[in-house]
Amino acid sequence: MNLCDFAPEYIRSIQPYQPGKPISELAREMELDESCVIKLASNENPLGTSPLALDAMINALHDVALYPDGSGYELKAALSKRYAVAPEQIILGNGSNDILDLAARVFLKPGAAAVYSQHAFAVYPLVVQMIGANGISVPALDYGHDLPAMLDAITPETRIVFIASPNNPTGTLSNADDLLRFMERVSRDVLVVMDEAYNEYLPEANKPDSIKWLKQFSNLLITRTFSKIYSLAGVRVGYGLTHPDVANLMNRVRQPFNVSSIGLVGALAALHDAEFVQKSYALNRAGMLQLTEGFRKLSIETIPSYGNFISFRIKGDATNTPKVYQSLLQQGIIVRPLGIYEMPHHLRVTVGLESENKRFLESLEYAMGELA
Ligand SMILES: *Cc1c(COP(=O)(O)O)cnc(C)c1O
């Protein structure tokens, strides 16, 4: 036996998360100029960073010799005010993935279980498996979450249910009434994680009153992120809103300085950059229309999306999908293949700038021509 054989089987069998291909990597592989490459693979904000956040972070660089405020006092105070929750209900994370990981570490152990939907965000099975707990994947309904079936899938060992709304990579939204009904029916000894990474991209009419539900349900954890509309994916800041007792447990297992000083000030400034958020929202709405219209013209089937990305289906057998993916790469366009999501016919594209969407659609048309 060598050292690595002593690692638990549930660790050795983990399939690593596959991130979107970085621009520099594709440029190297295809011998392209980096400036010619368009990355629409990781649901990043195409407008770049909020100018207010950028200024705040540049200023904060002078103080990086010091540890960050481990309690995140100012950011929590701002979130507390914005969402009318107590600071004790907020937990900050190194991205919201960190919050998902903390929830798993607090509530799962080998033998325990977590429920999530087929085609749901890939980080859920990952954090469950890291603990050696059992993941229960519930078949999707029209690519979305089948909430009644997820409720039925809960076993006595189940401690967490993950719900992503909108979900990534399908873009599907669970109806607010259905979510509330789910909360009313689920046992209070099961933590429901509502992952709302794309909440800010929803029209007001589609936003659930989830934060209000915190008063009613002590087993609810809402996760949000600064990586998407707030444009700070690179500095890794996310947060969870929950019952103070749950936040307290999560605080015990987090690293004392899990959010960097740069991330803390960037997030605080981004939270207050209403103009940038509004601009990002409007750009996404227009870009989504542009892409949807483009797909329609190419007779390409899509899954209607509430996020800042959309998944589309390549016709014919599943070997066509990697061919289209490769052709797009050769043309300098990075999108995301969805094989690991049990969607081998689909690719996911992030809504970009108008010019990027246009080039993507032209490249896709060319790729489809190559197939024929
Ligand atoms: C992008 C995304 C996140 C956010 O991840 P961060 O760690 O905050 O960057 C969380 N959940 C879903 C479903 C996502 O798509």
Image: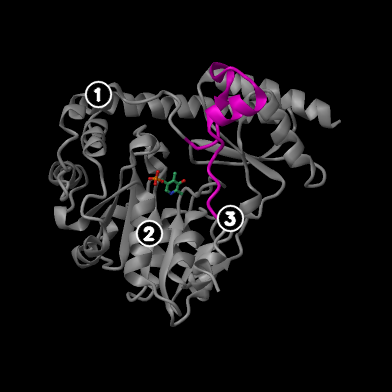
Which amino acid type is marked by label 1?
Answer: Leu
The picture places residue 253, in percent across and down from the top left corner, at 26, 63
The mark found on residue 101 in the picture is 2
Q: Residues within 10 Å of mark 2 (few under 14, many from 20)?
A: many
Q: Earlier in the sequence, mark 1 or mark 3?
A: 1
Residue 36 magenta-drawn? Answer: yes
Disc 2, SS? helix
For the residue labelled by badge 1, is the local secondary structure a helix, a strand or a loop?
helix
Relative to 257, 296 lies left or right: right
What amino acid is labelled 2 in the image?
Asp
Quadrant for the C terminus in the image = top right
**Cα distance in 3D space between marks 2 and 1:** 30 Å
Residue 96 lies in the magenta-colored region = no
Picture quadrant of residue 53: top left
- Bounds of the magenta segment: 16-43
| Residue name at image x 42 percent, y 44 percent | 206
Give the residue pinned by disc 1: 52
Mark 3 residue type = His
Quarter the N terminus occupies: bottom right
Q: Report the front residue among 266 and 80.
A: 266
Q: Callout 3 environment at 10 Å: few (<14), some (14 to 19), or many (20+)?
A: many
Q: Is residue 159 above or below residue 223?
A: below
Q: Is residue 153 above or below residue 117?
A: below
Q: CA distance from mark 1 to mark 3?
A: 36 Å
Residue that label 3 marks = 119
Residue reaching furthest front? 2
